[in-house]
Amino acid sequence: MNIFQSVILGIVQGITEFLPISSSAHLVIVPYLFKWEIPSDEAFVFNILVQVASLVGVFAFFWRDIYHILRAMLSGVIEKKPFAESDAKLGWYLILATIPAGVIGLLLKDQVEAAFDSPTITAFFLLITAALLVVAEKVGKRNRSLNELDWKDSLTIGFFQAIAIFPGISRSGSTITGGMIRNLERPPAARFAFLMSIPIMLAAGLLGMKDLLEVPNVTSLMVVFIPGFIASAVVSFFAIGWLLRFLNKYPLYLFAIYCVGLSILTFLTVLFRG
């Protein structure tokens, strides 16, 4: 990988991590479409780093929300009233929503890693993302806010996040779908989806860092990867704000159409390259 590829893929990660079009799919498909022969060990290290960079973008955008949630949770524990404040309740619901993806991710770790090597499988899962987005618009009544969230909503959204462990199934898309199926309005569903990405991305980043340190020549690779890291963090910050504004006015169909189009393009490329 060179610096140009690092920056381009960092931008791609920053945009697609939070838009419901699957960042993991794009990190598989974009190098494949452009015939970038990136060694698997380099791609592995880079994917970990840009995911951590996206986490930096989430923290930067939602730092006030995170501060109020953590303060309310701590206060609730000290006062032995853990659910007294709405922010504290939201924090516990975010933790609950993280559990399904954590458990399923550990159980299917080998299968997930194998799927990352296949543009065809990734393209197929993109179609599932498109279907989820259409279902969200057709089924959801969009008449509830985050203040009306309960534990059943949280667990349901958590199970939707769990299916996004495979490349091509968008984490933001599946979790927004879960929220909208539980009749949340689009922006609150997206806000909850972004906030609940923090624990799972943090855990994945910490686990990945352990493996990262075992990669040969990791220090020399950092010179190439750091520009991509910065690009991913900055673009992630702006992508979150853009999507929240978009969802105030428009449905998810545009993203579903994009996923179908990218899936078809990938299938055709695989077919004609033989």
Image (tube, rainbow, N blue to C red):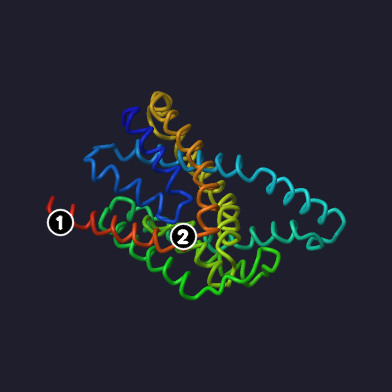
Judge by depth and name the residue closer to the eye, 160 or 136.
136
On screen, 176 above or below 25?
Answer: below
Disc on the earlier residue, 2 or 1: 2
Find numbered disc 1 in the image and state the secondary structure of the residue it sits on.
helix
Determine crowd level at label 2: few under 14, some 14-19, many 20+ residues with C-alpha closer than 10 A: many
Q: Residue furthest right?
A: 79
The quadrant in which residue 222 appears is: top left
Q: Is residue 40 left or right of residue 52?
A: left
In percent of width and height, residue 268 lies at: 18, 56
Q: Is residue 1 left or right of residue 190?
A: left
Check disc 2 and report the residue beneath it. Answer: 173
On screen, 140 above or below 66?
Answer: below
* Labelled disc at residue 36: none
Determine crowd level at label 1: few under 14, some 14-19, many 20+ residues with C-alpha closer than 10 A: few
In percent of width and height, residue 55 lies at: 54, 43
Check disc 1 and report the residue beneath it. Answer: 271
Q: Is residue 118 left or right of residue 268?
A: right
Judge by depth and name the residue closer to the eye, 153 or 180.
180
Q: Residue at x 13, y 50 (%)?
A: 273
Q: Residue at x 31, y 40 (%)?
A: 40
Question: Identity of the amino acid at label 2?
Answer: Gly
Question: Identity of the amino acid at label 1?
Answer: Leu
Q: Residue at x 43, y 35 (%)?
A: 214
Cα separation between marks 2 and 1: 27 Å
